[in-house]
């Protein structure tokens, strides 16, 4: 048999086998296709069904992220334990310093006195189940939601007290935060121990560095200086951001500062969520002032 004829015969046999295979599976294949069309029709029928299906999909994705995160966490137990031991040591040092300041008073009594009206910040823990660092707009998914007391605009920091981001949106059991590694992230920053404030943002270039701008040229700025948060309606003051790597003077006579982040954003596991008790009052007052202007009543 000529080679050309043999090739045609083999091609025909392959096609026949493929057709026979399709005959065997065409019923379940047709069922899957019709089911997909029905689901698509149902999903787009009303706004309620769209919202319902979106909520279900978010819950399923959250559970999947949580399962993957638990597997990764197993391999990071040693590093986490070391961090926890360091944190315990730091807290013990602070407790000892507290005892010295209060002249040996019982910590419980003194701390209760400090957690009344003076307690402006409420802390709760959360576990990171998804975290991206390679995009221009990076987000963090946490395993706590509204039923755990989580609200939008709560600060996200590490147990060591370094910046991570803040909560953007919540469901009942999960929350999503905007990462400091997001080009839309903005907050204030200043040099620790000095009254020089600027605007902090990420330029989208390197996940280890952020930028502090608007630092005036007369500021006493040195490599290695620690950059912390200022007063805001989200972050507590003095949350560590990072250290000054380098800086340059811009044409507007302000420094543009390259800041190396203190937080290892690629290895986040446990975080603290911080709610500022007076945040709503502060934001309302600021909005009223901005929207209402500074008009004064000079009538008699």
Image (spheres, rainbow, N blue to C red):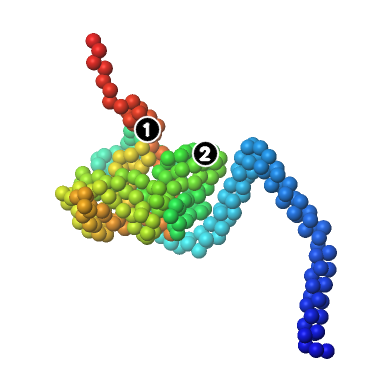
Q: Residue furthest top?
A: 300
For the residue carrying disc 2, how many other residues have a C-alpha within 10 Å: few (<14), some (14-19), or many (20+)?
A: some
Residue 51 placement (x, y as % from top left): 61, 40
In which image quadrant can residue 28 be found? bottom right
Q: Residue at horizontal 73%, vertical 47%?
A: 38
Residue placed most toward the observer, 120 or 267: 267
Q: Mark 1 or mark 2, which is nearer the start of the sequence?
A: 2
Residue 295 lies, with reference to residue 97, above or below; the image says above
Q: Residue at horizontal 79%, vertical 56%?
A: 30
Read off the residue under disc 2: 146
Secondary structure found at label 2:
helix
Residue 188 lies, with reference to residue 64, above or below; the image says above
In which image quadrant can residue 171 be found? top right
Residue placed most toward the observer, 75 or 280: 280
Which quarter of the image is occupied by the N terminus? bottom right
Residue 7 in sight: yes
Residue 181 lies, with reference to residue 276, above or below; the image says below
Which quarter of the image is occupied by the C terminus? top left
Residue placed most toward the observer, 17 or 86: 17
Q: CA distance from mark 2 to mark 1?
A: 21 Å
Instruction: Give the foreground label among 2 and 1.
Output: 1
Read off the residue under disc 1: 283
Residue 287 placement (x, y as % from top left): 36, 30
Secondary structure found at label 1:
helix
């Amino acid at each position: 048999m000529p080679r050309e004829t043999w090739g045609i015969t083999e091609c025909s046999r392959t096609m026949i086998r493929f057709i026979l295979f399709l005959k065997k599976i065409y019923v379940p294949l047709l069922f899957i296709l019709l089911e997909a069309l029905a689901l698509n029709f149902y999903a787009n029928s009303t706004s309620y069904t769209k919202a319902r299906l979106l909520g279900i999909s978010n819950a399923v994705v959250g559970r999947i992220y949580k399962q993957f995160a638990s597997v990764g966490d197993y391999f990071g137990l040693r590093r986490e334990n070391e961090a926890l031991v360091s944190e315990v040591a730091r807290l013990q040092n602070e407790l000892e310093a507290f005892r010295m300041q209060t002249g040996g008073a019982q910590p419980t009594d003194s701390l209760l006195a400090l957690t009344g009206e003076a307690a402006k910040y409420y802390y709760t823990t959360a576990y990171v189940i998804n975290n991206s660092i390679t995009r221009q707009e990076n987000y963090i998914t946490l395993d706590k939601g509204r039923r755990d007391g989580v609200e939008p605009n709560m600060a996200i920091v590490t147990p060591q007290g370094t910046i991570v981001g803040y909560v953007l949106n919540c469901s009942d059991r999960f929350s999503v935060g905007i990462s400091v590694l997001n080009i839309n992230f903005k907050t204030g920053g200043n040099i620790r121990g000095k009254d020089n404030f600027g605007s902090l943002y990420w330029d989208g270039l390197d996940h280890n560095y952020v930028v502090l701008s608007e630092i005036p040229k007369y500021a006493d700025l040195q490599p290695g200086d620690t950059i912390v948060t200022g007063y805001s309606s989200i972050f507590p003051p003095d949350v560590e951001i990072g250290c000054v790597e380098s800086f340059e003077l811009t044409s507007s006579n302000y420094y543009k500062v390259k800041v190396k982040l203190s937080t290892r954003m690629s290895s986040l596991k446990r975080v603290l969520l911080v709610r500022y008790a007076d945040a709503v009052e502060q934001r309302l007052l600021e909005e009223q002032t901005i929207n209402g202007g500074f008009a004064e009543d000079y009538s008699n």
